Image (cartoon, rainbow, N blue to C red):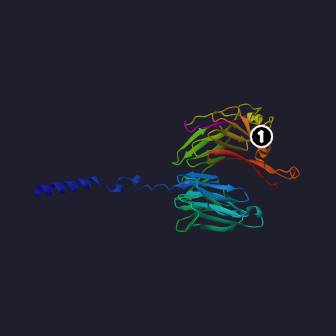
C-alpha cells in the first residue's frame, strides 16, 4: 500500500512539473488568431458552395447564386435605377451595397439613397444593415471576421455583429478608395490597423490587390508585393504601371523601353507555377499594329487575362491578344465587327445618335468582350 501511495505521489509531482502555466511560455501562446478578411467583388465569386454573380449594367443589376448542381437562384429583385455597387460573400450570406437611381441624381443638388443589405444564398432572410442619404454615395469596403466595414463618404465604419458601430478612420475630403487587406485599411497614403486604429504612412503611386496579395508601386517605381502575413518583397524594379491581377500569384505590368524615340512599353507576366518567372509579352507598337493603328502610342486602357492568354484593350475599343509566354499580338475583338456578329440593333437611320463601347472583363475565369450602348455627356 505504501509503495502504491508513493507511486501516485511521484506521478502527481512529475505532472505538476511538466504542466507549465501558459504565461511562462511567452506571448506567442496567447496570440489572437487574425480574423478572416472578405473582400468585395463587382462581377462574380466562386467558392465551395457555388457561385454568386452580378448581372446587369450601370442602370440596373441583380445578384444571382448558382449551386454545385447548376440550379440558379435570384437573390435580389431590383427595379430600374437600383444599382448594386459591390458585394461580399461569407458562408451562406451575401452582403451588398446599392444606390437608388444614381444616374438621376446630381451630387451638387441632391442626395443618393444608399442601402447596405444582406441575403442568404437561397434568397431568404434579407436584412438591412445600413441606410443613409449621402451626397457621395456609400461603399462596402469588405468584411472582417463577423463585422462589416463600409464607408459613408467621409467615415470608414466598422459594424459589429451585435449592431454596434465604431469609426475606424475619417477623411477630410471625400474618399471611398479604401482597400481592406489582411486586417488593415489602406486609404490614400495611410495604413490603418482595424483592431488598434493605429495609423502608419504608406506612400504608393498605384495599388491593386487580390485575395492573397497586395501589389503596389512605391516612390522609386519598384513593384512590391505584400502577402497575407505581412511579408514584403520586390517583384520588379523600374515599373511604369500595374495593369491586372487574378486570384493567383499572377500580375501583368508595364516597363518603359530603352528606346527614347519609340517609347516602348513592355509587359511581363508572373507565371503562377514558377515563382518570379517573367515573360516579355509585347510592346505597345506591336499591339497598335495588330489593331491597325500606326504609331499613335496611346496607353493601354485595360488588360485582362485567363488561361488562354493576355488581352489588351486600347483607346478605340479594339482588343489584341498574346500568349501567356509572349507572342506577336493578334486582333481578337473590334466594336463594329462584334456588333454585326452579335446582331445588335443598329438602325442606320439612328446610327448617328447611337454610341456603343466595347467592354473587356473577366467572368467565371474567362475573358469576355461585349458591346453596350453608352451615353453622350
- Judge by depth and name the residue closer to the eye, 168 or 87: 87
Residue 136 in magenta stretch: no
* Vertical arrangement, residue 138 with respect to residue 324, above or below: below
Q: How many marks?
A: 1
Residue 107: x and y, percent?
75, 63
The spot of residue 102 in percent (x, y) is: 73, 62
In the rendered image, the vertical position of residue 39 relative to residue 239, given as above or below: below
Quarter that holds the C terminus? bottom right
Q: Is residue 217 visible?
A: no
Task: Provide residue 46's location: percent of width, then percent of height.
Answer: 57, 51
Magenta part of the chain: 264-274
Residue on which the image places disc 1? 298
User: In x, y percent, where is residue 24?
Assistant: 34, 54
Q: Give the side of residue 352 with respect to residue 180, left or right.
A: right
- Above-or-below relation of 263 to 52: above
Q: Is residue 265 magenta?
A: yes
The residue closer to the viewer here, 196 or 346, is: 346
Quarter assignment of residue 223: top right
Would you call the spot at circle 1 few (<14 residues within 10 Å), some (14-19), or many (20 or more)? few
Q: Is residue 131 visible?
A: yes
Quadrant of residue 101 within the rendered picture: bottom right
Amino acid at each position: 500500500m505504501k509503495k502504491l501511495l508513493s507511486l501516485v505521489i511521484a506521478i502527481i509531482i512529475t505532472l505538476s512539473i511538466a504542466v507549465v502555466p501558459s504565461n511562462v511560455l511567452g506571448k506567442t501562446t496567447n496570440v489572437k488568431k487574425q480574423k478572416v478578411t472578405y473582400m468585395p467583388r463587382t462581377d462574380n465569386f466562386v467558392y465551395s458552395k457555388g457561385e454568386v454573380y452580378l448581372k446587369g449594367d450601370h442602370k440596373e443589376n441583380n445578384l444571382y447564386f448558382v449551386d454545385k448542381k447548376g440550379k440558379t437562384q435570384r437573390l435580389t429583385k431590383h427595379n430600374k435605377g437600383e444599382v448594386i455597387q459591390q458585394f461580399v460573400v461569407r458562408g451562406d450570406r451575401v452582403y451588398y451595397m446599392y444606390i437608388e437611381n444614381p444616374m438621376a441624381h446630381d451630387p451638387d443638388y441632391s442626395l443618393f439613397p444608399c442601402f447596405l443589405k444582406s441575403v442568404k444564398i437561397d434568397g431568404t432572410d434579407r436584412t438591412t444593415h445600413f441606410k443613409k442619404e449621402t451626397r457621395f454615395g456609400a461603399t462596402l469596403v469588405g468584411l472582417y471576421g463577423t463585422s462589416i466595414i463600409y464607408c459613408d463618404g467621409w467615415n470608414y465604419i466598422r459594424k459589429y455583429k451585435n449592431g454596434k458601430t465604431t469609426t475606424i478612420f475619417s477623411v477630410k475630403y471625400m474618399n471611398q478608395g479604401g482597400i481592406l487587406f489582411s486586417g488593415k485599411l489602406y486609404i490614400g497614403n495611410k495604413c490603418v490597423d482595424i483592431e488598434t486604429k493605429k495609423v502608419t504612412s504608406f506612400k504608393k503611386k498605384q495599388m491593386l490587390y487580390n485575395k492573397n496579395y497586395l501589389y503596389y508601386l512605391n516612390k522609386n517605381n519598384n513593384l512590391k508585393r505584400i502577402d497575407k502575413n505581412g511579408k514584403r518583397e520586390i517583384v520588379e524594379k523600374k515599373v511604369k504601371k500595374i495593369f491586372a491581377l487574378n486570384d493567383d500569384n499572377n500580375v501583368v505590368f508595364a516597363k518603359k523601353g530603352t528606346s527614347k524615340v519609340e517609347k516602348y512599353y513592355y509587359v511581363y507576366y508572373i507565371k503562377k507555377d514558377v515563382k518570379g518567372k517573367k515573360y516579355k509579352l509585347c510592346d505597345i507598337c506591336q499591339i497598335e499594329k495588330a489593331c491597325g493603328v500606326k504609331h499613335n502610342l496611346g496607353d493601354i486602357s485595360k488588360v485582362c487575362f485567363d488561361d488562354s492568354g493576355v488581352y489588351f484593350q486600347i483607346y478605340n475599343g479594339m482588343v489584341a491578344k498574346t500568349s501567356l509566354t509572349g507572342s506577336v499580338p493578334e486582333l481578337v475583338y473590334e466594336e463594329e465587327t462584334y456588333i454585326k456578329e452579335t446582331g445588335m440593333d443598329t438602325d442606320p437611320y439612328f446610327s448617328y445618335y447611337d454610341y456603343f463601347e466595347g467592354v473587356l472583363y473577366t467572368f467565371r475565369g474567362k475573358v469576355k468582350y461585349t458591346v453596350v450602348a453608352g451615353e453622350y455627356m
